[in-house]
Amino acid sequence: MRKNLFISLILTGIFCQSVFAQYFTLRVGGGYAWPGITATQGVMGPKVDPLSPDKDGLLPMSNMNDSIPSIQSVYGSYGKGMNLSLGFGYMINPYIGVELGVAYLKSAKITCDQTRQLSIQTGFGVPPSFSTVPYYMNAHITTSAFGVSLMPSVILKGAKPGWKIYPYGHVGISMPIFGGLEHDITIDVDPNVFTEQPLLASSIYGSPYFLGKQTKVKLKTEGTVSIGVNGGMGIAYNPIPLISIMAEVNGQYLVTRAKSSKITQWDSEKADGTFESRLADRGVYRTQFNYVDKLTNTSNNEDYNSTTDKTKPKDDIRPAGPFSNLGFNVAVCFNLSKEILKPFKEKKKKG
């Protein structure tokens, strides 16, 4: 009997501690992140190549210069940049809780520059022709990302009831639900081409090049279902039971998979200095891209299918976008329960 009574008292104590520890949390925070300790992930960018101007798509970004010649791969992560987060959670007991977070990311810009020699492709299988005096075009490519992710997490707190300063940690998954990549390309052609080689200038303004003195291009990429993991460790300070101030270091491993891309702007500068849209001239096949995991002889890609339909988007191998990062965040968390809010209600009644 005494033994059972003793066990009952212990269980009652644990239950009461859990009941009083149960509360909701509302967290608002923000911070900044970098690609990580080492930048080893390649970034995809629009293809810019006068040797095959009719074969559009995304390729690993690189700095190139045909006049030297030289090439250098570009590494980075779209996870670099400023982020804002909002989380709604529930502490099951003083040490364990769950949270559903929503995070917004606006990535820093990733850039590369390519200097390519102008050439004329006269036909399939025919070597490209170059002018006696080499002329070049310079392409400046900028890419960045924006998006919203759901981040369900498990929260672990190393605090006994009543502690004002304590360590905590969290681990969860990252699920992008909205956003995409944006690429901006500015292509400048050597101005001497238009005075010294009018035939060449006329050729690159037409199909398949569509290049003017300057050409402004925008390309947008949407993602498909992707899942990553995230976690963090930090210190929390409770000046009062209602509010927690938190600071942490965190990290994420996430690689997104592309669903489709679309060129939304292709404006070429004419001889008189005005710009003309060439989107309609390029057609659907050279403006819209549908990404797949495998290309076959039935894919809408002329490299694999001789009966390609140019009125439909081009099928291409699915690229990926790196979003892994390491960063820091600060946040304010509101702890909400009847027990926590009770003193404030009583004070309000007395006032």
Image: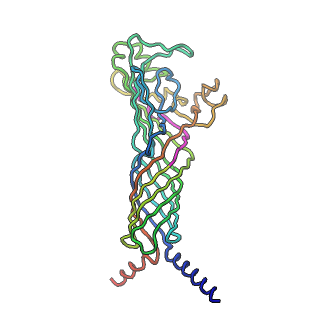
**Quadrant including the N terminus:** bottom right
Which range is magenta?
253-268
Relative to residue 91, is residue 143 depicted above or below? above
Outermost residue toward the right in this view: 297
Q: Is residue 4 left or right of residue 18?
A: right
Q: Is residue 196 left or right of residue 251?
A: left
In magenta stretch: residue 263: yes
Q: Position of residue 109 (x, y in %)?
A: 39, 40
Outermost residue toward the bottom in this view: 1
* Residue at screen point 49% across, 60% down: 170
* Residue at screen point 54% across, 40% down: 258
Q: Position of residue 32 (x, y in %)?
A: 39, 51
In magenta stretch: residue 18: no
The quarter of the picture where residue 2 lies is: bottom right
- Closest to the observer, 165 or 304: 165
Relative to residue 177, is residue 213 depicted above or below? above
